[in-house]
Image (cartoon, rainbow, N blue to C red):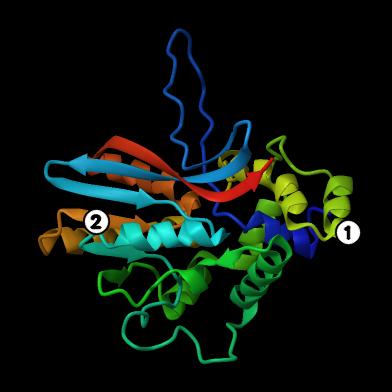
């Protein structure tokens, strides 16, 4: 089941968060790793949440705005509203350099080839099964303050060739990664799928997605899909700071943020604030 189309789709439903393991030497107690995605429960609902985490250095404020690629419509509405408060929003999308310039990422009816096309189809199928909205459809990428801060298609393919990597190999490696202990059972998934009830399927998946920090422990880091894209994003961030921007929002998948947080701290930034947004809300 883990290597099925559904499993690969589920594994990329939410950008995972990486958390590295380290040797604990008594009596030193390490601070807990920063969470960028979580599951919260109360007497009324179960909620998948993503974080907005602020880092400051002097007068400069950098907000890491986590995202899931399919979510409730209200989630994207709140994001679109919050984005207006930023002079600049740096966004991720491989090949999205033409967004905001009156051009589409791809021609109508045309889909990216290879693993990028496979991944897009996976999101579409899971979006339909879960009765959720898609990030690309709901986020207003034409906003004037949106700045592309990701690899072009050409850069992405070139780096993969240089590193002898591929998106498909990354997905397969994630499928083989050590389980977090919160994976849905095969029987539970099958029952939820056969019920055709989107909320039942979400309940089978929500804890796995909320524990994504353990899923990427041995995967994230010096690779194209995380490390190289983060370098590109932070290079664009530095350009914006040099241009006089003191408040910058970075709208990327949460899988990027442990590595990005480390790089920001190395540049002298400190985490000063964190708030949470409800991406999925499942009433009890």
The quadrant of the rendering that contains the N terminus is bottom right
Residue 183 appears left or right of 156 = right
Q: Which residue is mark 1?
A: 194
Q: Which residue is mark 2?
A: 248
Circle 1 sits in a helix, a strand or a loop, which is it? Answer: helix
Can residue 166 be seen at all in this image of the molecule? no
Residue 183 appears left or right of 93 = right
x then y, percent, for residue 7 = 75, 57
Can residue 282 be seen at all in this image of the molecule? yes
Q: Residues within 10 Å of mark 1 (few under 14, many from 20)?
A: few
x then y, percent, for residue 131 = 67, 63
Disc 2 or 1, which lies upstream in sequence? 1
Circle 2 sits in a helix, a strand or a loop, which is it? Answer: strand
The quadrant of the rendering that contains the C terminus is top right
Residue 250 appears left or right of 181 = left
Marks 2 and 1 sit apart, C-alpha to C-alpha, by 44 Å
Q: Say which quarter of the image contains residue 125.
A: bottom right
x then y, percent, for residue 180 = 68, 37
């Amino acid at each position: 089941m883990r290597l099925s189309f559904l499993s690969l789709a589920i594994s990329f439903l939410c950008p995972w968060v990486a958390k590295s393991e380290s040797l604990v030497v008594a009596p030193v107690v390490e601070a807990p790793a920063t969470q960028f995605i979580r599951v919260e429960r109360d007497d009324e609902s179960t909620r998948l949440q993503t974080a907005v985490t602020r880092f400051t250095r002097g007068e400069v404020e950098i907000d890491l705005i986590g995202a899931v690629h399919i979510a409730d419509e209200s989630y994207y509405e709140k994001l679109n509203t919050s984005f207006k408060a930023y002079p600049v929003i740096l966004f991720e999308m491989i090949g999205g350099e033409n967004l905001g310039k009156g051009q589409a990422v791809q021609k109508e009816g045309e889909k990216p080839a290879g693993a990028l096309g496979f991944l897009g189809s996976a999101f579409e199928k899971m979006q339909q099964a879960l009765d959720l909205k898609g990030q690309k459809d709901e986020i207003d990428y034409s906003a004037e303050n949106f700045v592309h801060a990701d690899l072009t298609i050409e850069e992405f393919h070139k780096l993969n060739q240089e590193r002898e990597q591929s998106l498909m190999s990354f997905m397969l490696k994630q499928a083989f990664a050590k389980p977090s202990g919160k994976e849905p059972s095969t029987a539970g998934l099958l029952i939820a799928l056969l019920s055709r009830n989107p909320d039942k399927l979400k309940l089978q998946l929500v804890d796995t997605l909320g524990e994504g920090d353990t899923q990427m422990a041995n995967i994230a880091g010096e690779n194209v899909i995380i490390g190289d894209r983060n370098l590109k994003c932070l290079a664009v961030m530095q350009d914006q700071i040099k241009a006089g921007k003191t408040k910058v929002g970075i709208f990327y998948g949460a899988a990027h943020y442990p590595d990005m947080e480390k790089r920001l701290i190395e540049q002298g930034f400190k985490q000063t604030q964190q708030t949470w947004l409800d991406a999925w809300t499942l009433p009890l």
